[in-house]
Image: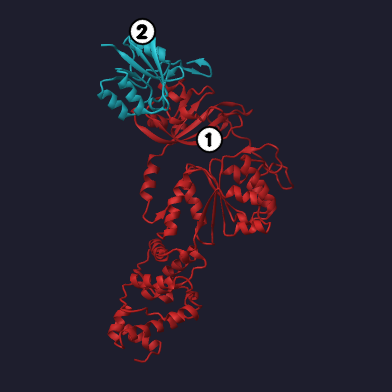
Chain colours: A red, B cyan
C-alpha cells in the first residue's frame, strides 16, 4: 500500500495559490495567530463577523480582536503544546459595533513538518441561527425527536436537558425499541458537544478482537494485517460523544480497558505506548439488567458504578399512559407526508386493534406497523385489513390496563356508551381471540345496549345502518 | 469639576472586555500618581457601571463594551473611549492630553517577535 505524503501548502497544486483567496472562500471566521497569540491573518468571514479589518488587526494580541469571553476566562491557546489536539468551546464575542454574539470556537495548533508548533488557527462560527432553529423546533409533548405526554415521559423530558448540559456519563436502560438511541442522540444534540462527533459503537456486534481495535484503534504493525495506524472510535469522537450501545454485551477484557479510560481519560491504541487524551463524553445503553449481570459475574461492578453516574430508564410503551394514541398520530402524520398519501386516518376498528395490542417491540414495533399500514392502505381510512395480519390473528394480549385503553379508544372515537363497556371483559382478559370474534362481541354488545334496535346500535358503533347490517351478516348474527 | 476616569484592567492593559474585568483603576486628570485600584469580587458589567457612578467618574477607557451598557453610561454623561487596546498608562496619557480616540490600538504590533 502506498502512503501519500501530506501535501505542503507550497506544493498543494502545480500553480501557486493565493492563500487569502482560499481562506476568503471559507464561510466561517478564521483567525491565524503566531505563537505569541498575535493576529497574523484573518479571513473575510471573520472581518464581517467582528468588524475588524485585516490591516487593523495585524500584529495585535488576539484577545483584543476576537474579544471573546473565553479569551479572558479560559484562553484555549494557552497551555497548548505540540501534542495538543483541537479544542472546541462555546463562548460569546463583542463585535466592533458593540453587539454580543454567541460563538463556537475551535482552536488547533499549526504544526510544521517536524511537529513543532508554529502558530494557532481559530475558527469562529456565529451560532445565533442554530440557536433560533433549536427554539423553533421545540414542539409540544416532545424533546428533540422523542414524543410522549405520559407522566413517565414528562419526568424524563424534565431531566434530559439538565443532564445534557452536564458532562456526566449516562446509562440508559429500557426494553428494546423504547428509544435508547434516540435519547442518546438527543442528549448529544442538546449538549455543548453538539458540533462534535456522535459516534455509536454496538458492543454486541463485533467479535472481541475486532472490537478492541475498533474502539481504541491500533498502531501500524501491532498485529498481522495492521498495515497502517487506525485512530479508533474514541479518537474520532474527540470533543464529542461516544455512545456504547448494548454495553451489557461488552467482553470482560474490554470492560477493564474501558474502566481505565473512564478513570484517566487516556486511550492507548493497540500496540502503542503513547496515550491520547480524549475529551469524550460517554453514554451507554443496554436492555439487559446490569445489576443481575454483576451478580452473575458477567459485568464488572466498578464499571457499572462509573457508568451509572446518571441513569435514564425508558418505560416500555405499555406503561406509558396515553402515549400509544399520540405516537400513532405522530407516525401516521409523518409517513402520510413522507409517502404523499391522501389518507384521513385510522378507522375506529383499526384504531381499536392498535390500542389493544401489546407492543413487545415497543415504539419501534408501533412505528413499523403504522408505516406498513400507511403504505398498503388504498382507502381514505386505514382499515383493520391494512394492518399486519399478526395483529389480527394471534391472541390480542390485553393484560395491561385494558380498561383505560378501552376508555381512551372510545373517547377518541366519540362512541357514546350509556352503561358499561361494549367489550366482554371476561373474554378479552382470559381467552385469546381473533379480531373477527372481537368485532362480533362488539356488535352483540352494542345490540344489547340498544335493546336490539339496529339504528341505535349503529349509532353506538359509529357506523352506518348498512355497515352494521353487512357486518351482522358477515359474522352470522341473527337479529 | 474634577475629571475622573475609570479604566478596567487586564494585567497591565486596558481590559479587552468591559464585562469581564475584575480590576478597575480610577484616576484624576493630570495626575497619574494618584490612582485608586479597585478589585471586584466577580466580573459584572452591572456592578462596574454602579461602581463608576458611585465613584463619580466622568470618563471610561475600555475595550469591548456592549451597546446596552454603552448607551446607559452615555446617558449618565460619561465619556466613553471604547475598543482601546494596549497599556493603560499610555491610554491614560493620551486621554490626559485629549488625543485619545475610540478604537485606538496602542499596543506594539509584532509578528513572531518582529515589529510590523
- In the depicted view, which residue is nearer to us: A363 or A224? A363
Q: Are marks 2 and 1 on the same chain?
A: no
Answer yes or no: is residue A18 visible.
no
Q: Chain of mark 1?
A: A
- In this view, the residue farthest toward the right is A224
Q: Nearer the viewer, residue A292 or A350?
A: A292
Q: Is residue A334 above or below residue A422?
A: above
Relative image position of residue A6 (x, y in whole percent): 61, 35
Residue A267, horizontal then vertical, whole percent = 64, 41
Q: Chain of mark 2?
A: B
Q: Nearer the viewer, residue A407 or B90?
A: A407
A438 displayed left or right of A230? left
| Marker disc for residue B31 | 2
Q: Is residue B115 left or right of residue A6?
A: left
Q: Is residue A349 visible?
A: yes
Which secondary structure, mark 2? strand
Q: In the rendered view, tell whether residue A355 sits above or below residue A305.
A: below
Out of B60 and A162, give the one closest to the viewer: A162
Position of residue A124 measured from the top left corner of the image (x, y, whole percent): 45, 34
Q: Image check: A221 left or right of A137?
A: right
Label placed on residue A87: 1
- Residue drawn at x 60%, y 49% as measured from the top left: A305
* Residue A279 figure quarter: top right
Q: Residue furthest bottom?
A: A478
Above or below residue B68? Residue A290 is below
* SS for dot 1: strand
Whether A330 is drawn above or below A403: the answer is: above
Could you classify mark 2 by the number of other residues whose Cα lies within 10 Å: few (under 14), some (14-19), or many (20 or more)? few
Amino acid at each position: 500500500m502506498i502512503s501519500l505524503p501530506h501535501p505542503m501548502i507550497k506544493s498543494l497544486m502545480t500553480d501557486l495559490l493565493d492563500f487569502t483567496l482560499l481562506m476568503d472562500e471559507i464561510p466561517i471566521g478564521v483567525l491565524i495567530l503566531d505563537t505569541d497569540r498575535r493576529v497574523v491573518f484573518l479571513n473575510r468571514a471573520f472581518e464581517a463577523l467582528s468588524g475588524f479589518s485585516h490591516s487593523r488587526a495585524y500584529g495585535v494580541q488576539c484577545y483584543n480582536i476576537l474579544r471573546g469571553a473565553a479569551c479572558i476566562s479560559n484562553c484555549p491557546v494557552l497551555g497548548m503544546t505540540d501534542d495538543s489536539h483541537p479544542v472546541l468551546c462555546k463562548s460569546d464575542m463583542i463585535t466592533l459595533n458593540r453587539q454580543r454574539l454567541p460563538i463556537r470556537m475551535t482552536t488547533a495548533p499549526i504544526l510544521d513538518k517536524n511537529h513543532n508548533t508554529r502558530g494557532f488557527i481559530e475558527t469562529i462560527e456565529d451560532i445565533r441561527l442554530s440557536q433560533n432553529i433549536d427554539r423553533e423546533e421545540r414542539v409540544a409533548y416532545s424533546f428533540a425527536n422523542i414524543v410522549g405526554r405520559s407522566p413517565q415521559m414528562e419526568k424524563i423530558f424534565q431531566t434530559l436537558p439538565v443532564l445534557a448540559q452536564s458532562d456526566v456519563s449516562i446509562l440508559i436502560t429500557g426494553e428494546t425499541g423504547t428509544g435508547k438511541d434516540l435519547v442518546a442522540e438527543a442528549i448529544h444534540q442538546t449538549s455543548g458537544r453538539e458540533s462534535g462527533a456522535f459516534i455509536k459503537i454496538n458492543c454486541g456486534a463485533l467479535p472481541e478482537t475486532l472490537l478492541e481495535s475498533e474502539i481504541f484503534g491500533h498502531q501500524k504493525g501491532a498485529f498481522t494485517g495492521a498495515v497502517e495506524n487506525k485512530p479508533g472510535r474514541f479518537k474520532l469522537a474527540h470533543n464529542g460523544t461516544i455512545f456504547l450501545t448494548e454495553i451489557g454485551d461488552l467482553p470482560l477484557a474490554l470492560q477493564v480497558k474501558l474502566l481505565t479510560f473512564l478513570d484517566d481519560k487516556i486511550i492507548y491504541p493497540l500496540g502503542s505506548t503513547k496515550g491520547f487524551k480524549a475529551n469524550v463524553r460517554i453514554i451507554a445503553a443496554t436492555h439487559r439488567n446490569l445489576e443481575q449481570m454483576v451478580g452473575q459475574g458477567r459485568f464488572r461492578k466498578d464499571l457499572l458504578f462509573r457508568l451509572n453516574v446518571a441513569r435514564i430508564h425508558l418505560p416500555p410503551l405499555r406503561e406509558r399512559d396515553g402515549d400509544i394514541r399520540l405516537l400513532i398520530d405522530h407516525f401516521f402524520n409523518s409517513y402520510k407526508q413522507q409517502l404523499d398519501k391522501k389518507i384521513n386516518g385510522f378507522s375506529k376498528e383499526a384504531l381499536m386493534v392498535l390500542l389493544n395490542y401489546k407492543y413487545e417491540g415497543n415504539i419501534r414495533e408501533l412505528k413499523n406497523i403504522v408505516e406498513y399500514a400507511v403504505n398498503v392502505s388504498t382507502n381514505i381510512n386505514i382499515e383493520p385489513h391494512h394492518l399486519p395480519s399478526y395483529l389480527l390473528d394471534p391472541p390480542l394480549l390485553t393484560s395491561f390496563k385494558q380498561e383505560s385503553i378501552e376508555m381512551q379508544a372510545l373517547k377518541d372515537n366519540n362512541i357514546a356508551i350509556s352503561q358499561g363497556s361494549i367489550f366482554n371483559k371476561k373474554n378479552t382478559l382470559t381467552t385469546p381471540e381473533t379480531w373477527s370474534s372481537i368485532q362480533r362481541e362488539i356488535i352483540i354488545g352494542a345490540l344489547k345496549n340498544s335493546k336490539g334496535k339496529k339504528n341505535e346500535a349503529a349509532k353506538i358503533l359509529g357506523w352506518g345502518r348498512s355497515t352494521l347490517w353487512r357486518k351482522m351478516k358477515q359474522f352470522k348474527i341473527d337479529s | 469639576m474634577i475629571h475622573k476616569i475609570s479604566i478596567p484592567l487586564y494585567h497591565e492593559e486596558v481590559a479587552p472586555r468591559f464585562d469581564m474585568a475584575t480590576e478597575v483603576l480610577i484616576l484624576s486628570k493630570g495626575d497619574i500618581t494618584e490612582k485608586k485600584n479597585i478589585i471586584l469580587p466577580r466580573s459584572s458589567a452591572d456592578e462596574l457601571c454602579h461602581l463608576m457612578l458611585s465613584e463619580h467618574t466622568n470618563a471610561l477607557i475600555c475595550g469591548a463594551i456592549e451597546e446596552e451598557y454603552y448607551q446607559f453610561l452615555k446617558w449618565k454623561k460619561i465619556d466613553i473611549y471604547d475598543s482601546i487596546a494596549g497599556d493603560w498608562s499610555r491610554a491614560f496619557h493620551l486621554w490626559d492630553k485629549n488625543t485619545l480616540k475610540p478604537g485606538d490600538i496602542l499596543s506594539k504590533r509584532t509578528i513572531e517577535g518582529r515589529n510590523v
